[in-house]
Amino acid sequence: MKTFLLHQTPKSANQDTWTVTFSLPYIATEYAPAGNGVWYVRSWLGAEQIKRRLAILFDHPDELIVHELGRADLAGTAKLKWLEGRLEDDDMDASWHVPRGVWTVIQSAVGTLAR
């Protein structure tokens, strides 16, 4: 799993960042807002894949910057409030064949027991 910093720079004053915010669950397993037009994203996709998937939202290709974070950069992401995304692993053979709802219940139960 990789962590990315996404930054949208709108080319016009009336352009809003809500379309990217709305689209993040579909390109991330987790995401966290970091400011206006700035998000942290955890995904198994690469930077170019993320840019391609979000390209339809922009008039200019340079409106979105996707930067992969290194280990030194990850320390600052620990205090963020991460939201659950909807991106699921394409490699289903390497993971358990459990419906998402069941997996969520299992994770919740393990989290409760760990407390």
Image (cartoon, rainbow, N blue to C red):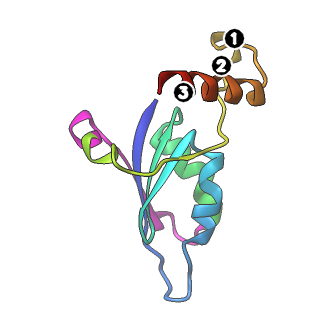
Q: Count how many numbered circles sit on residues in the image.
A: 3
Foreground mark, 1 or 3, reads: 3
User: Is the C-beta separation of discs 1 and 3 under 8 Å?
Assistant: no
Q: Is residue 61 magenta?
A: yes
Dot 2 or dot 3: first in sequence order is 2
Front residue of this view, candidates 31 and 52: 31
User: Is the C-beta separation of discs 1 and 2 under 8 Å?
Assistant: yes
The residue beneath circle 2 is 91
Kind of residue indicated by mark 3: Gly
How much space separates mark 1 and mark 3, taking CA atoms?
Answer: 25 Å
**Crowd band around label 2 with a 10 angstrom C-alpha radius: few (<14), some (14–19), many (20+):** few
**Residue displayed at 32% across by 42% down:** 69
Above or below, 85 relative to 22: above
Kind of residue indicated by mark 2: Asp
**Residue displayed at 49% across by 44% down:** 48
Q: Is residue 109 left or right of residue 79?
A: right
Above or below, 81 relative to 86: below
Q: Which mark is residue 93?
A: 1
The residue beneath circle 3 is 111
The magenta stretch is: 58-74
